[in-house]
Structures are given as structure tokens and as C-alpha cells.
Image (cartoon, coloured by chain):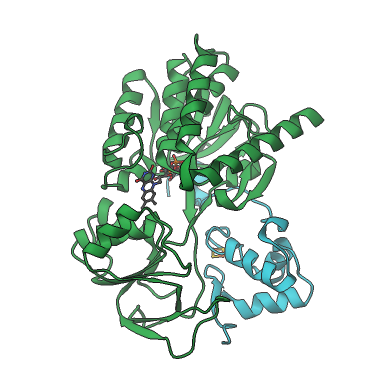
Chain colours: A green, B cyan
């Protein structure tokens, strides 16, 4: 083990949630170190070349990677230390086990914010392990970060926002997209994204599923079929596409391994993507001094990740002894913005789910 | 459709059929399936297969995903070379 490091607030994950938490904690006066396993900070935002949705104060109309650049610049300017190529491999009380530059060491902190994001869900069907079948996020990393086209003729599974956006980005990168397959009777993503790919001539097959993929050593063809009322494939409706890329955009699961290791209490919550750690209004878990924010606390959006990060950062700094002078006002403002983001047909379910998680946390606290 | 041959845990190459048989033999928690078959014990530590295994378990036992626990998580969160832990560069 190499030398141990000590800081006041440690943040795991350099996506919008982690960077926002770091900035808030630093502005409150704490010494902050962010660790991220990637070569550059920014998390998912680094791959997002499309313009964002939502309100002005949440960067609507701006491209994701630009928002990341600004956050990183602000963090640097304020004196947040950003450790890239650094993996948090474990958590032991208030100390992170890290591997930095190929060497293991430790990072101890008074308070820790976990902002590790989410991982893509897999789908199991015959041929699903063939090269050429991959997560939509993986395809996005290929195209937008590494400038590599992972296939020339593609089919997408999932018509949520992620599926619709990857469709458009594959088209922009010069691939042919033969269709988007969606098991639900309706398109899950925003109508504007769907309209964009329809204009480009890509059909969306709702109430359809992938039956199987086939190929010699790599993906060569995929067969899809229509589904009946009960979700069973309808015989005779099969359709086969000769393709070399199948992108799965079938949801995300919060990446919570460190919170489990730390002994946080969890609750299963479908609208938030799976098991999420119980947290307070301040984003504190059931482990004192351990805070969560962003997709790992419930899969949502970059805008909500920024606000949750702010709350977690302010509270983590306060826990470490740095109370922002306007702490209560700042927290109230962030909560108000979160509530505004969680409204409408897309946000309502997530709003209620987070309310329930906070209620459970309060119940836990009162029972102590 | 018989999908027993579909691979569920790609790290350990465990099929749907093997997982179903484990459940029928009494491995009715994620933890038990893991110990019985090694599914979820591979390089990715179940990041890819955990959700799929829980779905099969839910179907086979008539439970909802919320009733099932996802098993334990231990360090390291990603594969780490032993040389790193020894403090030497590989
Ligand atoms: C295709 C696509 C399009 C999207 N479009 C929009 C949009 O238009 N508008 C919008 O608001 N949102 C959008 N989102 C959602 C948004 O990107 C996410 O909600 C947001 O990035 C979540 O932020 P986060 O900080 O929680 O996680 P992330 O951005 O995922 O960052 C987490 C970081 O932590 C790192 N990490 C994880 N574990 C460890 C560890 N143990 N050690 C070290 N580092 C670790 C990860 O590598 C990653 O860099 C989109 C998502 C996708 C996939
Ligand atoms: S897919 Fe099962 S452990 Fe990796």
C-alpha cells in the first residue's frame, strides 16, 4: 500500500452529481477531493453531444459535454482536487480504498459523497453474447468519445430517451439504423426525440421484441417479432434484419456497490431503477457522514443529479464542520428546483418515489 | 420456446437452464444461486447478470423484484491487479 491521504470531503464519481457536490462543498470552505475511474471527469455528460432539455437554469439547449467542461473549470478554479484514473474499490468506515495510477492506497475523509451513477441493464436472448450486441451507452462511448463506429447497420432495442438519442447519434456518425424495437405499446422517450428519428425515416416497432441474434463469431442477423396482449411473440410476425450492431437501451440500474459495502439501508423502488439507499432530504444515508447523489440514488437526469449533488455537497461540508453562511436558504432553493424538475408526466413518478425514500429514512431515524 | 441454453452470467458462462435447475433444487435466493452455480461471482461481480438472475428468480418463485435481495457486495468494485495491492507497478 502506498501513502494514505486525508481530506475533509471525498466524492466518488466525477459526473454532474459528483462535480456539483464537490463545488458546493468547496464553496462552503471544505477541502475536497473527487475520484473518478475515467481518464477525464464529466461522467455521462462527456458523451452527450446533443442539446439538453428542461429549464434555462438547468442548461436547456446546451450540449452535455459543454456543461461538463464548465463544471470541471469551476471546480478547478475553486480548488477542488480532481483525481482521474482513480478507482474507489472499497469503503471501510470513513476511508476509501483506492487504486490510483496502478497503486492501491487509502483516502480518509470526514464525510463522503457517493455519486457513482448507474449501469446499463442487459437483456438475455439466444445470441446475446455475440460481438456486436452492446449497451447503447457503450455504443455512445465508441462514437462520441473514441470516434469509432461500432457497426454500419444497426437495430436499437428500447424507445426511451437513451434509445432514441443513440439512434440519432448513430445516424449522425454515418451508420444506417434499420429500426427501434420497443416491447411497450408506447414510445417511452420525449416526443421531440421520436419525431427527429421518424423524420430521418427510422421505423419504431412498438409491441415488438428481439427473439434471437445469430452470426458466425460476430453478429450477422437479428430476428424480431410482434407481441400479443400478454407479451408473447405472435407466430408468423417474425422479421429478420441483416445487421452488425444491436444496441440495448433497456434501462439503467443504480450503481450502489459502495453504499451496500458501507452498510446503508436500501429500499427497492421500481421508478428509480432498482434498489436505492434510503436518504434524508439532505441526501444523507443511514450511515452518518455518508451522502449520495445522482443516478446512484435513483436513475433520473443530469439536471436532477446537479441539484442532488448540491444538496449532498452542502450537507457533507456541514458534516465536516463547514456550514455555508446561507445553508438553510441554499438547501431550500435546491429542493424547490428539484421539485420543479420532478413535475409533469415524466417527473411525477420519480417525485413520489423520492418522497417515499425520504419517508423511510425518517422512519428509520425516529426508530433509532 | 426453450431458452435453457441462453447465457445469463457471461463471466462464468452460466445458462438460464442451470439457474432454473438450481432454483428447483432449492436455491431460492440470489445468494444461494451464486454459491450453487458461481453466477454473479465473475469478473464484473454480477453487474451484468444480477438483474437477469433476479428476474428469473422472481418468475420461477412468483415473487416481485422488490421482495428479492440482491446479495452481498464486497470489495473490490472492479477487477484490481494483485500487484496494485502489493504497492508495485505491474
Ligand atoms: C444516451 C443518454 C442521453 C441522456 N440525455 C440526457 C439529457 O438530454 N438531459 C438530461 O438531463 N440527462 C440526460 N441523460 C441522463 C444523465 O446523463 C444522467 O442522469 C447523469 O449523467 C447522471 O449523473 P451522475 O453524476 O449521477 O452519474 P454519471 O454521469 O454516470 O457519473 C458517475 C461517474 O462515477 C464514476 N464511478 C462509478 N463508480 C466509481 C468508483 N467505484 N470509483 C471511481 N469512479 C466511479 C463513473 O465512471 C462515472 O464517471 C442521458 C443519459 C444517457 C445515457
Ligand atoms: S456476468 Fe455474471 S459475474 Fe459478470
Q: Is residue A147 left or right of residue A256?
A: left
Q: Name the residue: 69% across, 62% down.
A: B64
Using the image as rendered, state which of residue A45 and residue B38 is in the foreground.
A45
Residue A296 position in % (x across, y down) = 53, 43
Q: Name the residue: 75% across, 34% down.
A: A364
Using the image as rendered, state which of residue A271 and residue B12 is in the foreground.
A271
Q: Is residue A119 left or right of residue A44?
A: right
The quadrant where ligand 1 appears is top left
Using the image as rendered, state which of residue A159 and residue A102 is in the foreground.
A159
Residue A335 position in % (x across, y down) = 52, 27
Q: Name the residue: 55% across, 23% down.
A: A316
Name, please, the residue furthest toward the top.
Answer: A325
Residue A27 position in % (x across, y down) = 42, 16
Q: Name the residue: 35% across, 84% down.
A: A240
Image quarter where the C terminus of chain A lies is top right
Q: How many marks?
A: 0
Position above or below: B36 against A118 = below
Whether residue A7 is visible, yes or no, is no
Q: Quadrant of residue A67?
A: top left
Q: Is residue A105 left or right of residue A260?
A: left
Q: Quadrant of residue A232?
A: bottom right
Position above or below: A239 against A150 = below
Using the image as rendered, state which of residue A88 and residue B55 is in the foreground.
B55
Whether residue A238 is visible, yes or no, is yes
Amino acid at each position: 500500500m502506498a501513502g494514505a491521504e486525508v481530506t475533509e470531503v471525498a466524492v466518488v464519481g466525477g459526473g454532474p452529481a459528483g462535480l456539483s457536490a464537490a463545488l458546493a462543498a468547496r464553496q462552503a470552505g471544505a477541502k475536497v477531493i473527487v475520484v473518478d475511474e475515467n481518464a477525464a471527469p464529466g461522467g455521462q455528460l462527456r458523451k452527450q453531444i446533443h442539446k439538453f432539455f428542461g429549464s434555462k437554469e438547468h442548461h436547456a439547449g446546451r450540449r452535455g459535454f459543454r456543461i461538463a467542461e464548465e463544471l470541471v473549470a469551476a471546480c478547478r478554479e475553486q480548488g477542488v482536487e480532481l483525481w482521474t484514473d482513480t478507482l474507489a474499490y472499497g469503503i471501510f468506515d470513513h476511508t476509501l480504498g483506492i487504486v490510483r495510477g496502478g497503486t492501491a492506497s487509502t483516502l480518509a475523509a470526514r464525510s463522503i459523497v457517493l455519486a457513482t451513477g448507474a449501469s446499463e441493464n442487459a437483456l438475455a436472448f439466444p445470441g446475446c453474447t455475440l460481438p456486436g450486441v452492446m449497451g447503447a451507452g457503450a455504443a455512445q462511448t465508441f462514437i462520441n468519445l473514441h470516434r469509432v463506429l461500432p457497426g454500419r447497420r444497426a437495430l436499437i432495442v428500447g424507445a426511451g430517451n437513451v434509445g432514441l438519442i443513440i439512434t440519432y447519434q448513430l445516424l449522425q456518425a454515418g451508420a444506417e439504423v434499420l429500426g427501434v424495437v420497443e416491447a411497450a405499446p408506447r414510445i417511452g422517450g420525449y416526443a421531440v426525440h421520436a419525431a427527429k428519428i421518424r423524420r430521418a425515416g427510422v421505423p419504431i416497432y412498438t409491441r415488438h421484441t428481439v427473439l434471437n441474434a445469430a452470426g458466425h463469431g460476430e453478429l450477422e442477423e437479428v430476428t424480431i417479432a410482434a407481441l400479443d396482449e400478454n407479451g408473447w411473440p405472435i407466430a408468423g410476425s417474425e422479421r429478420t434484419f441483416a445487421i452488425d450492431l444491436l444496441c440495448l437501451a433497456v434501462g439503467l440500474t443504480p450503481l450502489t456497490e459502495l453504499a451496500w459495502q458501507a452498510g446503508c439501508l436500501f429500499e427497492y423502488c421500481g421508478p428509480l431503477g432498482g434498489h436505492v439507499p434510503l436518504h434524508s432530504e439532505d441526501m444523507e444515508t443511514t450511515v452518518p457522514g455518508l451522502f449520495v447523489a445522482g443516478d446512484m440514488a435513483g436513475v433520473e437526469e443530469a439536471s436532477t443529479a446537479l441539484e442532488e449533488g448540491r444538496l449532498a455537497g452542502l450537507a457533507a461540508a456541514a458534516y465536516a464542520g463547514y456550514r455555508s453562511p446561507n445553508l438553510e436558504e441554499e438547501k431550500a432553493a435546491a429542493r424547490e428546483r428539484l421539485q420543479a424538475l420532478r413535475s409533469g408526466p415524466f417527473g411525477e413518478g420519480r417525485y413520489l418515489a423520492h418522497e417515499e425514500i425520504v419517508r423511510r429514512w425518517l422512519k428509520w431515524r425516529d426508530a433509532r | 420456446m426453450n431458452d435453457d441454453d441462453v447465457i445469463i452470467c457471461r463471466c462464468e458462462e452460466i445458462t438460464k437452464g442451470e439457474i432454473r435447475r438450481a432454483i428447483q433444487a432449492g436455491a431460492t435466493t440470489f445468494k444461494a444461486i451464486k454459491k450453487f452455480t458461481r453466477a454473479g461471482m465473475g469478473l464484473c461481480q454480477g453487474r451484468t447478470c444480477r438483474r437477469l438472475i433476479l428476474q428469473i428468480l422472481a418468475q420461477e418463485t412468483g415473487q416481485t423484484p422488490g421482495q428479492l435481495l440482491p446479495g452481498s457486495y464486497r470489495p473490490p468494485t472492479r477487477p484490481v491487479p494483485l500487484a496494485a495491492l502489493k504497492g508495485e507497478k505491474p
